[in-house]
Each structure stands twice: as structure tokens, then as C-alpha cells.
Image (cartoon, helix red, strand yellow):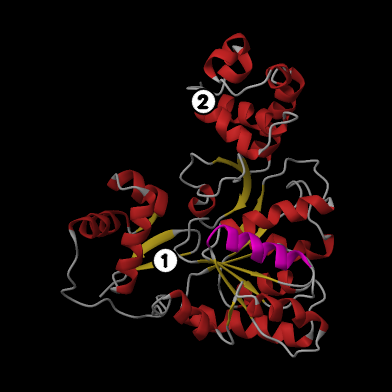
Amino acid sequence: MTREQELIYRMALSKVPGVGRVTARRLLDAVDDISQLFEDRSLLKERIPFISDRLVAALDCPELLARAEKELDFSKKNQITVLTFRDEEYPSRLRECEDAPLLLFYKGNSTLNNLKVVSVVGTRHITDYGKEMVATFIRELSSLCPGVLIVSGLAYGVDIHAHRAALTNGLDTVAVLAHGLDRIYPSVHRKTAVNMLQHGGLLTEYTSGTNPDPSNFVCRNRIVAGMCDATIVVESAKKGGALITADIANSYARDCFAFPGRARDLYSVGCNQLIKNNKAALIQSAADFVEAMGWEPTPNLHSPTQREAFVELSNQEQVVVNLLMEEDKLHINTLVVKANIPVNKMCALLFELELKGVVRTLAGGVYQLMHN
């Protein structure tokens, strides 16, 4: 089965009525080949004891397969990458979550498996205090941890300010959308979204033609929480999407933080509640956050810092260095293939080499040797 055929089947499976994300993964785990779910349904009851007659009948869906073919054509025409959770480019942190999307559609140039990934979320009704917190936090974080990936939802308020602050401070930023990649919502954020394609990207689980319905925003919050090391809530009222994201982050055993506000401020109530109920740790600065995460501040490798002479390297680190000596610049995926080292191990190796001043990271997951 070709890659394209597999993607078509997966797109169709994601649209079958009655098949949710968890059920879809159970079905895939139960067969050797996804085509068996659609082309050999007479044997499904034998292969999958838990499958119902209704579900077997629902898998007879030529119209969904035809729609999936059109979606794949749309993705290819618009340079959209379609990711399954078996792909190395799929967010590895998100893959650990039981309700991770069967497919993701991504347009951008940044790796979704950055060494450090942080979501910044909050109210759409951001106050001047919130704007200051977002701008200051991301500016300080870019200095302490250059190369950190900032994730949010491109919505009004905290989201768009987080994306713009990331771009201003030279950080890649990814927006998780609640609709297909055939549109930008809200449309007034289109210019920022276009800039993000060169310094991050746009990510969604929804096919083209999907409207930004309210329920989709709730669903996309699990991606925002699941693909990150930590979620930071800047401002929130007593109820809101940011609090849902925080709850999901907690359910995924991800770290969650919140900026406190004055007791009577409407858009600080949610953050204060998170802190009071031990659902989020209180932070007042990027330094607080980095310390709580146990992250060592990283030297800014975009500055002309020279790597130390005679630095000690492990055997695998030396393999990576040798490859970079041959090619000068290599994408992390190319390093994974050439070195035959798993992507999670490669991420750790590159991080250590950055700390040692041996390599530096460039835009889009590309690495280069520092030169003496």
C-alpha cells in the first residue's frame, strides 16, 4: 500500500460516523493493514471481537473515500503536510495522548518536535496588564531559552499577542486552528498567520471546508495542551477556553502555570482559581517558569559565540558532528536518517551539543556547527 493510499484510508476513517479518536486507534491496532477495515469487511468480526454490526456497515463508505482523495489533492496543491501519528514529524508529545488526532494537517517550516514547546493561552478580552505580561514573558523567555517554540490558537486576545510577541523576539510560533487550512479565522489575523508560515506554522486536525464551529475550539484545545511541555495561562475569566486547556494539560500530566492578578479583576479570576486549586503553579516571570521546569538557561547560539575547544563528545554526538562537518547544515530529519538514531534520541543529542556550544539551531529545525 502506498503512502497516499494509507492517507486516504485514514482520512476516511476519521470521518466514519460513530468512530471517535479512541475507537479509531483501537481499530488500527487490531488490523495489520488499514485497508482491511474498508476492503475486507466480511472478516472484521473475526479480527476485531469488539466491533459491532453497525460499525462494520458504516465502514462501507465509498463517498468518504472519494472525499478523502479530494482532500489529499487539496493538500498536495497547497503544500500542506499530512501527518499520521506514526510519522516522525507528528508531535511526539501529542502522540502519547489517548485522544490524539488520527491525522494532522500542517503548513509551515518549524519542527513540531522542538526541544522545548510552550503554549501561551488566555482570554480573548486581554487587558493592558495581560498584554504587558505576554510581551515581557516571551521576550524574557527568548533570552533564557532561544529556540523555544510558542504554541497558541490565533484567536483574539492572548493568543494573537503571544504569536506576535514570538515573531518579534525571533521565536517560531505555531497556531492550532479550529477549522481547515482553506481559511484563516479570524480573518483580521491573516497577516500574522502568513508571517508564521516562515517562522512556525499552522496546524489543524480538520479538513478543508470545516467551519470554525464553537465545539471545534474546545476540541483543538487538547492539541494545544498535548503537544507542549507546559501550558501558561495569562488571563482568564471565571469560565473560558483557557481554563479548559489548563484542565486538559493537567489530565495529560503536563505542567501548567498561571500569572496571578488582582482579586477583583474580572479577567484574573480564572488564573487565581487555578492557582488556588493547585491546578497551576504561580509564576511572575520567565525566570520563574524556567526554574520550575528545571530547564537550564541556554546561551543564545545565534550570537557569535565560539564553541569550546577540546570539548568531550560521546560516540553518538561525534557521529552527528561528523555529519554536520560534511554537509554544514542539516535538518533534524536528515540527521535522524543518516545517523540511524531515533528522533527522540537525536533531539536529546542536539540539545546537549547546543549546551556544549558545538552546534546551533537555525530556522525550521536545521542545525549547523559552530565554528572556532
- Residue 347 location, quadrant: bottom left
Which residue is under mark 2?
Answer: 30
User: Could you tell me what secondary structure mostly forms the magenta stretch?
Assistant: helix
Q: Which amino acid type corresponds to the residue marked 2 in the rendered image?
A: Ala
**How far from the left and from the top, in percent, is residue 97?**
55, 49
Name which residue lies at 65% across and 82% down. Answer: 259
Q: Secondary structure at mark 1?
A: strand
Asked whether residue 201 is drawn in magenta, I would say no
Q: Is residue 113 above or below residue 299?
A: above
**Magenta region: which residues?**
240-253
Left or right: residue 1 versus residue 279 is left
- Residue 115 location, quadrant: bottom left
Residue neighbourhood size for the residue with mark 1, other residues' Cα within 10 Å, grouped as few (<14), some (14–19), many (≥20): many
**How far from the left and from the top, in percent, is residue 67?**
75, 27
- The answer to the question of whether label 1 and label 2 lie on touching residues, with beta carbons closer than 8 A, is no
Q: Which mark is residue 361?
A: 1
Mark 1 and mark 2: Cα distance apart in space: 40 Å
Nearer to me, 105 or 253: 253
Q: Is residue 114 above or below residue 160?
A: above
